[in-house]
């Protein structure tokens, strides 16, 4: 036999022996453990209430107006409350207030002529900035929620957080922008406020 062949055969034999030794040693010395106690998961309170302080906005026979004139309109008032207490919850609840167009009542009033303003009245008094609804950023709701509520498009009015026991009250005003002309006569808009909460 050639000496090169003997060297190669020797090296291969040594490598096979080393591999078998390492594999046997690893399986002999490896340790497996099993959990003895069960995992426990405890949830805290997650409960938000929504209450209306006034009926829906009705702008029947309305006309284009300035923001100063719109201040005299009766707003839609609502309160959002984190009904959890500090004894059963520690984390705040996040919320989003959206104004939604509905699939059953497609608006005929152009959204670039409908003005909206959301004012906080409690716990502090903060006058919101009015905006044309077409300029309000959309909010992405889950498809199942949109379908179940009959929502076409959601517009994000405000986002916030409520600690356990806290409340916030808002006044929503809608009006036809003063730049609208006579072409909006007999147009309509039907919308719904939705408060979406999450942790």
Image: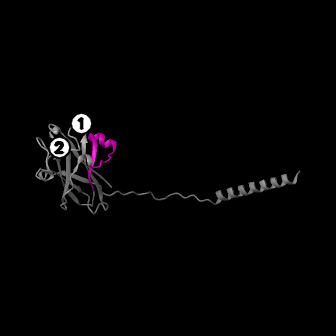
Residue at 34%, 56% in the rendered image: 43
Q: Residues within 10 Å of mark 1 (few under 14, many from 20)?
A: few
Which numbered disc flags the more N-terminal residue, 2 or 1?
A: 1
| Front residue of this view, candidates 28 and 183 | 183
Disc 2 versus disc 1: distance between alpha carbons?
25 Å
Mark 1, secondary structure of its residue: loop
Which residue is tagged 1?
A: 104
Question: Which circle marks residue 77 in the picture?
Answer: none
Which of label 2 and label 1 is nearer to you?
2
**Range shown magenta:** 136-159
Q: Residue at x 21, y 43 (%)?
A: 191
Say which residue appears at 87% left-offset and 54% top-offset: 3
Q: Is residue 151 above or below residue 22?
A: above
Q: Is residue 151 left or right of residue 61?
A: right
In the rendered image, residue 144 lying in the magenta stretch gets the answer yes
The percent position of residue 170, horizontal first and vertical second, equals 19, 55
Q: Secondary structure at mark 2?
A: loop
Q: Residue furthest right?
A: 1
Q: Position of residue 91 (x, y in %)?
A: 32, 60
Give the camera-side residue of 173 and 199.
Answer: 173
Q: Which residue is mark 2?
A: 180
The verdict on residue 133 being magenta is no
Q: Quadrant of the C terminus?
A: bottom left
């Amino acid at each position: 036999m050639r000496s090169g062949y003997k060297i190669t055969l020797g090296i291969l034999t040594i490598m096979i022996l080393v591999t078998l030794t390492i594999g046997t040693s690893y399986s002999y010395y490896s340790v497996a453990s099993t959990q003895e106690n069960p995992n426990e998961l405890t949830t805290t309170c997650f409960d938000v209430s929504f209450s209306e302080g006034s009926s829906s906005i009705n702008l029947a026979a309305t006309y284009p107006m300035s923001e100063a004139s719109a201040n005299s309109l009766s707003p839609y008032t609502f309160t959002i409350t984190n009904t959890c207490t500090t004894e059963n919850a520690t984390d705040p609840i996040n919320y989003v207030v959206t104004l939604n167009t509905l699939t059953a009542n497609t608006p005929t009033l152009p959204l670039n002529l409908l003005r909206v303003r959301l004012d906080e009245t409690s716990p502090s008094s903060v006058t919101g900035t009015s905006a044309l609804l077409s300029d309000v950023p959309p909010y992405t709701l889950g498809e199942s929620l949109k379908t179940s509520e009959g929502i076409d498009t959601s517009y994000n009015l405000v986002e916030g957080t409520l600690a356990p026991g806290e409340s916030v009250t808002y006044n929503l005003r809608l009006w036809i922008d003063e730049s609208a002309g006579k072409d909006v006569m007999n147009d309509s808009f039907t919308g719904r406020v939705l408060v979406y909460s999450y942790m």
